[in-house]
Image (cartoon, rainbow, N blue to C red):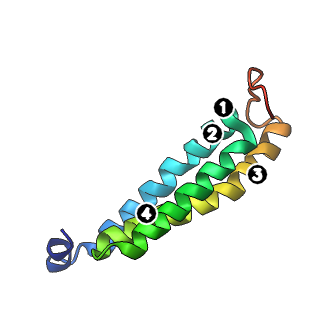
Amino acid sequence: MTAFLEQYHLLGLTVGFVVFLCIGVFHPLVIKAEYYCGQRIIWAFLAAGILFAACSLLTDDFFASVVFGGLTASSFWSIGEIKKQKKRVEKGWFPNNPNRKHP
């Protein structure tokens, strides 16, 4: 796949688009994760970030490595966003989950 993208000079655009999609997927994921799980979900984002980083380091394909790198950055960034999301909920910008047992 990487050879095809390099041959037609599409690698940079494709990588940019895939990383843009990663960011776009993680934004609502953070909102939903905080709503249903609260701050406990931080550990899942940390584990996912470590797993994606390992995958990025272990793959030989450049395109796959960059995609895993984008997922790594999005996962680690989400840890801070979960904390900010809690503050946004406290301000009333997002709904609080009344059924969640642990804050």
Whole-Å distance between the Cαs marked 1 and 3?
15 Å
- Locate residue 73: give its quadrant: bottom right
- Label 3 close to label 4 by CB (< 8 Å): no
Q: Amino acid at mark 4?
A: Val
Give the mark nearer the N terminus: 1 vs 3: 1
Q: Name the residue tied to disc 2.
A: 33
Whole-Å distance between the Cαs marked 2 and 3?
13 Å
Depth check: give the residue in front, 37 or 19. 37
**How many numbered discs, if any?**
4
Q: Amino acid at mark 2?
A: Ala
Q: Horizontal placement of 92 versus 72: left or right? A: right
Q: Name the residue tied to disc 4.
A: 19
- Label 1 close to label 2 by CB (< 8 Å): yes
Q: Amino acid at mark 3?
A: Lys
From the top left corner, tell me how far across and down residue 57 is, in percent.
42, 75
Q: Name the residue tied to disc 3.
A: 84
Whole-Å distance between the Cαs marked 2 and 4?
20 Å
Q: Which secondary structure lies at badge 1? A: helix
The residue that appears at 71% across and 58% down in the rendered structure is: 80
Give the mark nearer the N terminus: 2 vs 4: 4
Q: Which secondary structure lies at badge 2? A: helix
Depth check: give the residue in front, 15 or 75. 75
Depth check: give the residue in front, 71 or 102. 102
Tell me the crowding category of disc 2: few under 14, some 14 to 19, or many 20 or more residues within 10 angstroms, Cα based. Answer: some
Give the mark nearer the N terminus: 2 vs 3: 2
Q: Name the residue tied to disc 1.
A: 36
Give the quadrant of the C terminus: top right
**Mark nearer the viewer, 2 or 4:** 2
**Mark nearer the viewer, 4 or 1:** 1
**Mark nearer the viewer, 2 or 3:** 2
From the top left corner, tell me how far across and down residue 28 is, in percent.
56, 42
From the top left corner, tell me how far across and down residue 94 is, in percent.
73, 35
